Amino acid sequence: MRSEQFRELAILPGANRYGEKEGFDRIALRPGDTVSIVGSTGSGKSAFVNDIEVLAQGDTVTGRSILINGLPPSDDMVRDPAKKPIALITQNTRVIADLTVERFLSLHIKARDTDAHALVEKTVALANEFTGEKIAPGMRMTSLSGGQTRSLLIADAILIGQTPILLLDEVENAGIFKEKVIRCLKHYHKAVIFVTHDPLLAMITDRRIIMKNGAVTAVLEPGGTERDMVLHVSGIDAFLVELRERIRAGDLIGADLLKNPVVPA
Amino acid sequence: MKLVIVAGPPSAGKTAVIRQIVREFRSTESPVFLKIDVVRAFEDEELRAEFGIPARKVYSGDLCPDHMGIMILRDAIAWAEGLKAGMLIVESAGLCLRCTPYATQSFGIAVLSAVSGSNTPLKMAPMIALADVAVVTKTDLISQAEKEVFRECIRMVRTGLDIIETNAIQGTGMRYLMQAIAAAPEISDPETITLRGTPPLGVCTICVGKKEIGWQHHFGVIRPLDAADNLFRGD
């Protein structure tokens, strides 16, 4: 399904590990929406995005159902990945195909019947905006680093797959420029769900889903109430980003780093 | 009775798929199971313990396991019929991939793993080309883009083949396989079952294109289901 045909994805509740109904009636996701999913390890975050990815119809352990544009998805949409409106990219997503970047993207373009010759180059260029280590079309997919793989798959989902919904499972751990990715996803008007342990990422999404014991316990919509704290936390985040870069570059960390104007008091 | 033949390379997830089939049809079809392997196999014990269904295995030893499978298939149908089974599930050894164990009047499932590499569908071409359905397992381990690329590689072998993507351990995506099995026809006449394709090596009656199942129809090295030693028929 192409972006222009997608209007809404709805998640209908299932039950937690003890068989009790979840704490929501319906979660709707529309183009441009950003949602984060938070909760401790084992709380069911990945199962939640997996339900969306497989377009569950009460047939997974959680019992959730997914509607696309208000209807149960057609068999075609569930079975043919080229017709599925969803791309799931996780920190564990590997590419096993023993192909070059160029050949891989070309086969994907062929699978999509998209006839665009320049698309391979454009996709690689976009991926290179998300990662500090440059990707070349002649590299083998299997030799890409974790960050390069995630960057390429996100760029692929945007430009080749033209997927309206992206599920990103802890990708902030995978060496990509998360702010650039988010800006780009907003630019392309994607609906995005982030499974995350990153406080800033959780705070800058429109909604925050809280999970416990395999079920959603609350859906928060902070509106503007966290705005001041978002500014504060993004200062801390920028500080940590710079600190990380300096440590990676082999610097000894002196007090001069604290002169950075964004450093929180 | 339905005959379901499951083929695919080792570790592709054939048994995980069969487990889901048995779970689905246990109460309605009284399935029975036969595993063909070369030296060791455990699937029969596992399925018997887990589901309490009649299950057995047969070792081919020095014989080609697909040759073996073709020889004993007629006996196996008789065994399953004797147990009043509604479904006989046969799991191949999955070794050289050149032979296609699918027979007429059966439902043939090719199982291949999404992590096996993009050229694998081309390497196991006949096993995919003559199947009724290809089940791609372990799809939870690869990306959306790679799923599409792998699918494209299967379609290079046979355009329009029914492809089912699944994580067979959790059973996601399996409902389409179950629907296809439920809709598959029963065996109409076991005496007229033949192989769908011709195995590639011209060294035995099967290899040269004789498709009848059952050792009764063959010469050279033959095997009934209930005999431990290799037998020879002919001059």
Image (spheres, coloured by chain):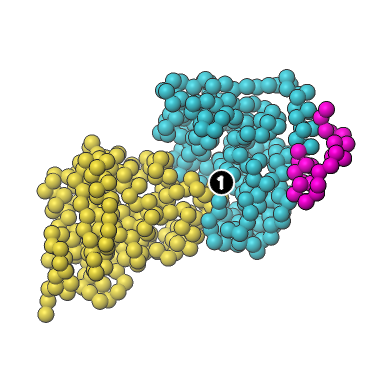
Chain colours: A cyan, B yellow
Neighbour tally class for label 1: few under 14, some 14-19, many 20 plus, Cα within 10 Å: some
Q: Secondary structure at mark 1?
A: loop
- Residue A19, compared with residue B97, is above or below; it is above
Find residue B18 and report its horizontal and vertical position in percent: 31, 47
Query: Looking at the image, how many numbered discs can be counted on the residues?
Result: 1
When the figure is inspected, residue A218 is found, relative to residue A106, above or below; the finding is above
Residue drawn at 57 percent across, 21 percent down = A218
Kindly tell me whether residue A237 is visible in this rendering.
Answer: yes
Three-letter code for the amino acid on which mark 1 is drawn: Asn
Q: Residue at x 44, y 30 (%)?
A: A62
Taking the image as shown, residue A105 lies to the left or right of residue B224, namely right
Seen in the picture, residue B4 relative to B65 is either above or below; the reply is above
User: Does residue B189 appear in the picture of this structure?
Assistant: no
- Percent position of residue A77, x then y: 49, 41
Q: Position of residue A233 (x, y in %)?
A: 75, 29
In this rendering, would B167 be left or right of B32?
A: right
Q: Position of residue A194 (x, y in %)?
A: 62, 35
Image quarter of residue B95: bottom left
Q: Quadrant of the N terminus of chain A?
A: top right
Who's the residue at 14% across and 52% down the image?
Answer: B79
Q: Quadrant of residue A9?
A: top right
Badge 1 sits on which subunit?
Answer: A
Q: Is residue A137 highlighted in magenta?
A: no
Of residues B90 and A1, the one nearer the viewer is B90
Quarter occupied by residue A115: bottom right
Quarter holding the C terminus of chain A? top right
Query: Mark 1 sits on what residue?
Result: A92
Magenta residues, start to end: A240-265
Q: Which of the pair A74/B168 is nearer the observer? A: B168
Q: Does the segment drawn in magenta span residue A245? A: yes
